[in-house]
Structures are given as C-alpha cells and as structure tokens.
Image (cartoon, grey):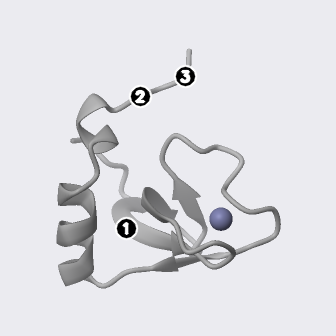
Amino acid sequence: MEEGNNQRKVAAVCDGCGTAYAAIEREGGTIQPIGHPNGCCDGAGMTVLSDREIDREIAGEPESKSRERGP
Ligand SMILES: [Zn+2]
C-alpha cells in the first residue's frame, strides 16, 4: 500500500446511515470512502473510527482485498 504524505487510510462510519467504510483521510480532515467518490448519504459527514476499530472493520471488509478502482 502506498499512501501520499497528506493522506492516510482509515475506517470511517457514515453519520447518515451508520455504514462503515475503508476510507482515505485527506489533509484538512476530508474523509473519502474508498470506492465511493461521491460519498455515502448526501450531506452527511463521516466519523473516523479509532485505530483499534480500524483493524476490526477493515479485517471484516471483503472489498478491502480487491482494491477496486475506476478506469
Ligand atoms: Zn450513509
């Protein structure tokens, strides 16, 4: 995994519906769910989980292995 200096991989939960995502936290605190460029619920924020929760959430996320990327 290669991440830029100004972003890191996190687990985050949508404030709108409570869905957990593997996400990128960008410089400035913007949370971008991986594979969901438009975010989740419109206008809802994302709450970053703690490091311990990240391990659990990502380990249980099957999509994290396939690393889907758009063309
Ligand atoms: Zn949502």
Q: Residue at x 55, y 75 (%)?
A: 18
The amino acid type found where label 1 is placed reads Ala
Whether pointer 1 and pointer 2 mark residues with C-beta atoms closer than 8 Å, the reply is no
Q: Position of residue 20 (x, y in %)?
A: 45, 66
Q: Residue at x 64, y 72 (%)?
A: 17
Picture layout, residue 60 above or below residue 27? above
Give the CA separation, mark 1 to mark 2.
Answer: 16 Å
| Residue tagged 2 | 68
Q: Quadrant of ligand 1?
A: bottom right
Give the CA separation, mark 3 to mark 2.
Answer: 7 Å
Q: Quadrant of the C terminus?
A: top right
| Residue tagged 1 | 11
> Outermost residue, right direction?
43
Residue in front for this viewpoint, 53 or 8: 53
| Residue tagged 3 | 70
Q: Residue at x 81, y 62 (%)?
A: 42
